[in-house]
Amino acid sequence: MRFSFVLSEVLTGLRRNVTMTVAMILTTAISLGLLGGGLLVVRMIDHMRDNFGDEVEVNVYLNRDISATDKDCKQQPCAGIQSALSQDANVDDVRWENQDQAFDRFQRVFAGQPELLELTRKESLPATFHLKLRNPDRADVIVQTYSNKPGIDRVEDQGVFLERFFGVLNGVRNGTWVVAAIQAVAALLLISNTIQVSAFTRRTEVGIMRLVGATRWYTQLPFLLEAVVAGLVGAVLAIGGLIGIKAVFIDNVLAEPIAANIIPRIQLWDILAISPILVAVAILISAVTGYVTLRLYVRT
């Protein structure tokens, strides 16, 4: 089998049906881009679990009177609360943060949002005990034990917020994959139609090749490679699109939560890490769709 002949047939087929080829490439690129977006969300969730898994705290917020009058937690009931927390078997470490320190931290975290800083007053930020637990799964015990203690405004488990946030990200991932699946169906139909049209336009020359002894595999291979090449181009466009969206959109829109270490930054390496998956999916889908189409619909 001459490689140059097969290559020329592939290029001829792509050029001859250029509009359908472009549509197939773009649809495949969009589908793979959405799939890649979902995979990036999965990596983001994994990074967040690694970053925050051992650092999830339970925060004990004190009421306004204590926050305003007892900055060193030397008076009752603040001192008693601190002693009880320090002696609690479920608590590994207790860190006190008075109102001034809470306001300073707030200003550092949201330094890039002057409007928010202007609207927020120090009095709205309570003094807080930050608890690191020996076993994070026991956070609900701490919440139930201290929620109704005198001087305590509320007790919050950061793990609950993180799970809700992970739930939102999972919803985004699932929605992205649903749209990707719909786009993938459209790409499959375009691949199938393109192969059928390409085979029909070259039916005469293929028929002559069969008369002179060419095998079915030899005559069908160019059509199969057309689909694979289009899929590979779509994968390259999808990867390039993810890199562009990261640089132009994500890094700018999420700059503040990234700087505050609320969410991890999506690195170029993350996109490169999922790129082989996108390329493999493109080759597999294109090759399988092309093969099935040739076997079922194209008699060459």
Image: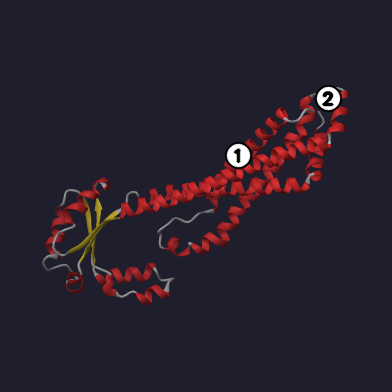
Residue 209: x %, y % from top left: 86, 27
Task: Tell me the kind of residue under disc 2.
Answer: Ala
| Of residues 158 and 93, the one drawn nearer to the viewer in this rendering | 158
Q: Which residue is mark 2?
A: 214
Q: How far apart are labels 2 and 1 at the CA level?
A: 31 Å
> Can you see residue 74?
yes
Disc 2 is placed on an element classified as loop
Picture layout, residue 181 above or below residue 268:
above
Q: Residue at x 72, y 39 (%)?
A: 193
Which residue, as the protein is rendered here, is positioned at the far top? 213
Q: Residue at x 65, y 33 (%)?
A: 288
Q: Residues within 10 Å of mark 1 (few under 14, many from 20)?
A: some
Residue 244 x, y percent position in the rendering: 60, 57
- According to the picture, the residue beneath numbered tag 1 turns out to be 281
Above-or-below relation of 42 to 95? above
Q: Which mark is residue 202?
A: none
- 190 or 148: which is nearer to us? 190
Q: Is residue 55 visible?
A: no
Image quarter (top left, top right, bottom left or bottom right) of the C terminus: top right
Q: Position of residue 153 (x, y in %)?
A: 20, 64
